Amino acid sequence: MKGLVVYHTKFGNCRKIAESLARGLEEAGLEVTLIDTSTHKVAPEYDFLSAGAGTRMGRVTGSMKRFIERDIKGDAWAGREFLAFGTGTRAEGKGSKYDDWSVRGAERIYEALDERGLKPVAGAAKFYVQELKGPSKRARRSAPIRWGSRRARPS
Ligand SMILES: Cc1cc2nc3c(=O)[nH]c(=O)nc-3n(C[C@H](O)[C@H](O)[C@H](O)COP(=O)(O)O)c2cc1C
């Protein structure tokens, strides 16, 4: 089973998560390709897709949005399994719009892939960073590795 892990990062947190996740998927038996969103023309030759990026004002980063629109077109990937993940700052719990925006990028990715007919193997995974740049404690530890190997279902 072939898996693709694609990420967009500005400060490096999503890259660390993507690398750990790729390791977890490999431990679960997948053959994994790891790319960032600047890689063009990805063919739907994978059984499994994992995509992750940061959050910008309650949305996914523009680079990941463009990647999905460009490379996950129509129903070409329909039926493949996916895992969406993302980073962002932790909500402060004051009931403002910022609470609602907390790590929404992960959910936006989930929604976009779901709309294209891919099948989620888990809910959107949220990784919190400190301030804007991080770091993310979970990204540094083995959480994404375990998450990947637990969620993957190699055939
Ligand atoms: C202009 C800007 C807007 C942001 N808006 C949000 C937001 O709405 N929600 C959130 O959780 N994080 C927000 N963040 C924090 C980023 O999501 C965080 O910097 C990013 O996830 C870190 O991941 P990276 O290291 O992979 O780039 C914002 C950051 C910037 C620079």
Image (spheres, grey):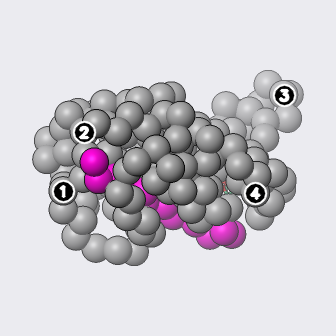
Q: Quadrant of the C terminus?
A: top left
Q: Is residue 119 above or below residue 3?
A: above
Residue 66 appears in the figure: no
Q: Earlier in the sequence, mark 1 or mark 4?
A: 1
- Position in image of residue 71 (x %, y %): 24, 59
Image position of 79 (left or right of 107) = left
Q: Which residue is mark 1?
A: 45
Residue at horizontal 28 percent and vertical 73 percent from the top: 40
Q: Which residue is mark 3?
A: 93
Image position of 49 (left or right of 61) = left
Label 2, label 1: how far apart the Cα atoms are: 10 Å
Label 2, label 4: how far apart the Cα atoms are: 28 Å
Marks 3 and 4: CB-CB under 8 Å? no
Check if residue 6 falls in the magenta segment.
yes
Residue at horizontal 77 percent and vertical 64 percent from the top: 133
Q: Earlier in the sequence, mark 3 or mark 4?
A: 3
Kind of residue at disc 1: Glu
**Which marked residue is nearer to the observer: mark 2 or mark 3?**
2
Label 2, label 3: how far apart the Cα atoms are: 36 Å
The one nearer the camera, 93 or 147, is: 147
Q: Which residue is mark 2?
A: 80
Q: Is residue 68 above or below residue 10?
A: above
Specify the quadrant of the image occupied by residue 132.
bottom right
- As drawn, the label of residue 140 is 4
Mark 4: few, some, or many residues within 10 Å (few <14, many ≥20)? few
Q: Earlier in the sequence, mark 3 or mark 1?
A: 1
